[in-house]
């Protein structure tokens, strides 16, 4: 029987080398010590990203018009005629006093048009309160009237649209005002002196330095001391040298309306 000394026993029981090697990491370490993304994982990330882009692009094509309408275009303002007719004071039958009138605070003018996005119409309105003018009446007729509008102050809900309107559609620097001038007397009261609700006005409309004869059916309301007149004048832009813009995905119809709502104050 051979007996081992203590040191010899220790050497005999411990293996010279380990039979297990360290398990390598699944991803190599980058220079900053963070694990690198494997090529397989990168392919999965890119595939997911491309899928999201395709879905968003499809949604834009399908819902683009409604998104543009709801997110980028404010709801169109009520027409001046509807506004006057729906006013709480209603359309009164009080006689209109004869004499001189001037356009007072509360008046406005502007335009209404349709933008078309992939076949869907989006109605746009733009207005200004920079309106001046005068009128003359007898007991039954409007015998003279002139309305002037500061075109450069007309504003919609979009700065880009307004810049185009002021620099491209209309040359505001050369033609800063638009005017309407009555060319024929208009009956504004019946034989009994009651104000008519609807009045047909014939006149000349000048926009962008171009003057055209127009006819407008206006709505009139009188409370005996003041008069409100509201109307829409249909126009074709090309008749006034105005080129309707076409931006590819958004086009503008070649026609629209000039709108006005005037408050006339009796001055004598």
Image (cartoon, helix red, strand yellow):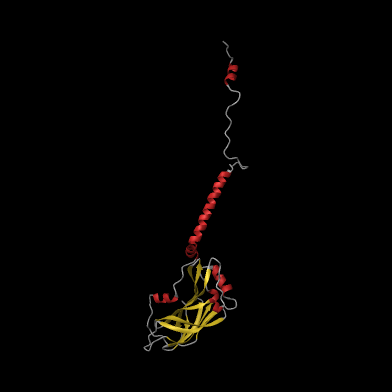
Question: Which residue is depicted at the point 44% across and 81% down?
Answer: 217
Q: Position of residue 15 (x, y in %)?
A: 59, 23
Q: Position of residue 237 (x, y in %)?
A: 53, 76
Q: Position of residue 179 (x, y in %)?
A: 52, 81
Question: In this view of the protein, which residue sits in the foreground, 65 or 36?
Answer: 65
In which quadrant is the C terminus drawn?
A: bottom left
**Res 268 visible:** no
Q: Position of residue 159 (x, y in %)?
A: 54, 68
Question: In this view of the protein, which residue sits in the foreground, 34 or 41?
Answer: 41
Question: Which residue is depicted at the point 53% across and 50% down?
Answer: 48
- In the displayed image of the protein, which residue is found farthest to the right? 31
In which quadrant is the N terminus drawn?
A: top right
Question: Which residue is depicted at the point 52% across and 78% down?
Answer: 149
The total number of labels drawn is 0
Q: Is residue 157 above or below residue 37?
A: below
- In the displayed image of the protein, which residue is found farthest to the top? 1
Rendered image quadrant of residue 12: top right
Rendered image quadrant of residue 224: bottom left
**Res 210 visible:** yes
């Amino acid at each position: 029987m051979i007996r081992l000394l203590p040191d010899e026993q220790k050497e005999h029981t411990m293996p010279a080398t380990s039979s297990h090697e360290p398990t390598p990491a699944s991803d190599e370490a980058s220079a900053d010590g963070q694990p690198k993304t494997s090529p397989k994982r990168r392919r999965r990330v890119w595939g997911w990203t491309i899928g999201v882009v395709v879905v968003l692009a499809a949604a834009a094509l399908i819902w683009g018009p409604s998104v543009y309408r709801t997110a980028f275009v404010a709801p169109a303002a009520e027409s001046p005629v509807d506004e006057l007719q729906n006013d709480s004071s209603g359309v009164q039958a009080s006689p209109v006093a004869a004499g001189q009138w001037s356009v007072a605070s509360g008046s406005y003018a502007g335009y209404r048009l349709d933008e078309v996005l992939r076949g869907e119409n989006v109605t746009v309105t733009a207005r200004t309160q920079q309106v001046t003018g005068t009128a003359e009446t007898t007991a039954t007729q409007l015998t003279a009237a002139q309305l002037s509008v500061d075109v450069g102050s007309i504003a919609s809900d979009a700065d880009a649209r307004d810049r185009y309107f002021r620099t491209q559609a209309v040359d505001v620097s050369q033609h800063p005002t638009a005017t309407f001038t009555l060319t024929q007397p208009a009956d504004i009261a019946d034989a009994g002196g009651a104000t008519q609700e609807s009045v047909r006005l014939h006149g000349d409309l000048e926009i962008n330095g171009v003057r055209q004869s127009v006819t407008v059916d206006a709505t009139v309301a009188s409370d005996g001391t003041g008069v409100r007149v509201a109307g829409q004048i249909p126009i074709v832009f090309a008749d006034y040298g105005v080129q309707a813009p076409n931006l590819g995905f958004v086009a503008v119809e070649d026609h629209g309306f000039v709108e006005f709502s005037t408050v006339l104050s009796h001055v004598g």
